Image (cartoon, helix red, strand yellow):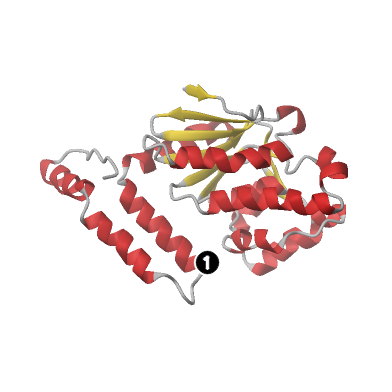
């Protein structure tokens, strides 16, 4: 696995067989997200987006104790009081927006704790796989923090309003089975199978036609976020691009020749 270390010592991007692994690395603090990590995240997403060799992005935490315990509370005294709180929220919003606007599929591989901003990030991905030992919470009500309304739509795209209210009102921890029932995760797996299953899912997606996946992701996101006024012309153009692509010709040939297609994204 190639290791491409960038500016932040607490995030890293690893590329392997069409998959970009974005690793949240702060294991001493359960992969809690520092301000520097929030600031760096959009750049990593942009890097993976602009790399033609990358077909799928996978977010994970360092090790297997935590996906992320959320924002690093040790910074709150300086970073989340007074005017600094708005700046910190802006960093959070830029990170969430980068994930939500990614055109490539994004998977969250959730080991252990997935709390606060960690759950916020996971909610912005397309697919979430969790291990059976995972725990989920959004605890601002226990800290006296107002939860930014801009971060709630990704949660509402997954869970019913009553479930999101329960998460935010109680700040309680929920087991992976509860998260599955709420719709927060797609699947719950034994801890020793989580990475294998995540790799298999990412590999399956990476082998498919990138333009087809992009068109599907674009349509689902647009129809979910703007159901009353979707940009259908943009969605139709994405579908038309699939039919005009070399990959469509390759898909037809591969079907007739009874072989696996080799898609290039063109």
Q: Residue furthest bottom?
A: 228
In the image shown, does 139 or 21 lie closer to the viewer?
21
| Residue 85 screen position, x and y as percent | 80, 52
Residue at 47% across / 38% down in the picture?
48
Q: Is residue 207 visible?
A: yes
Where 32 falls versus 175 (above or below)? above
Local crowd size for mark 1, using a 10 Å CA cut-off: few (<14), some (14–19), many (≥20): some
Kindly identify the residue that appears in the image at 29 percent across and 60 percent down: 239
Q: Residue at x 36, y 64 (%)?
A: 235
The number of discs equals: 1
Q: Is residue 30 left or right of residue 57?
A: right
Of residues 30 and 259, the one nearer the viewer is 30
Residue sticking out furthest to the top: 2
**From what the image shows, is residue 99 above or below residue 235?**
above
Residue 138 appears in the picture as rendered: no
| Residue 254 in picture, x, y percent from top left | 16, 42
In percent of the image, x 56 and y 25: which residue is there? Answer: 5
Query: In x, y percent, where is residue 31?
Result: 70, 34
Please give the residue where the numbered disc 1 appears in the rendered image.
Answer: 225
Task: Give the residue at the far front of this rendering.
Answer: 83
For residue 164, side relative to residue 205 (left or right): right
Q: Nearer the viewer, residue 26 or 94?
A: 94
Image quarter in which the C terminus is found? top left
Q: Is residue 164 left or right of residue 128?
A: right
Name above or below for residue 152 compared with residue 60.
Answer: below
> Going by the image, does 160 lie left or right of 71?
left
Q: Position of residue 195 (x, y in %)?
A: 52, 33
- Disc 1 secondary structure class: helix
């Amino acid at each position: 696995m190639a290791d491409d270390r960038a500016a932040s010592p607490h995030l890293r991007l690893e590329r392997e067989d069409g998959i970009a692994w974005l690793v949240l690395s702060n294991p001493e603090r359960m992969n809690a997200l520092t301000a520097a990590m929030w600031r760096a995240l959009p750049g990593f997403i942009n890097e993976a987006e602009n790399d033609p060799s990358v077909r799928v992005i996978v977010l994970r935490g360092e090790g297997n104790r935590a996906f992320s315990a959320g924002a690093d509370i040790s910074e709150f005294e300086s970073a989340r009081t007074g005017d600094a709180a708005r700046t910190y929220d802006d960093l959070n919003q830029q990170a969430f927006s980068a994930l939500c606007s990614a055109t490539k599929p994004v998977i969250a591989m959730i080991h252990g704790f997935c709390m606060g901003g960690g759950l916020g990030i996971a909610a912005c991905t397309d697919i979430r796989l969790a291990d059976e030992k995972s725990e989920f919470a959004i605890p601002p009500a226990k800290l006296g923090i107002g939860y930014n309304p801009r971060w709630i739509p990704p949660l509402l795209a997954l869970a019913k309003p009553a479930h999101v209210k329960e998460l935010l009102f109680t700040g309680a921890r929920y087991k992976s089975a509860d998260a599955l029932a709420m719709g927060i995760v797609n699947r719950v797996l034994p801890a020793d199978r989580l990475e294998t299953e995540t790799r298999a899912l990412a590999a399956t997606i990476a082998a498919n036609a990138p333009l087809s996946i992009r068109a599907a992701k674009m349509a689902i996101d647009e129809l979910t976020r703007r159901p009353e006024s979707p940009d259908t012309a943009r969605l139709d153009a994405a579908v038309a691009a699939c039919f005009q692509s070399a990959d469509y010709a390759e898909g037809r040939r591969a079907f007739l020749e009874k072989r696996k297609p080799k898609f290039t994204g063109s």
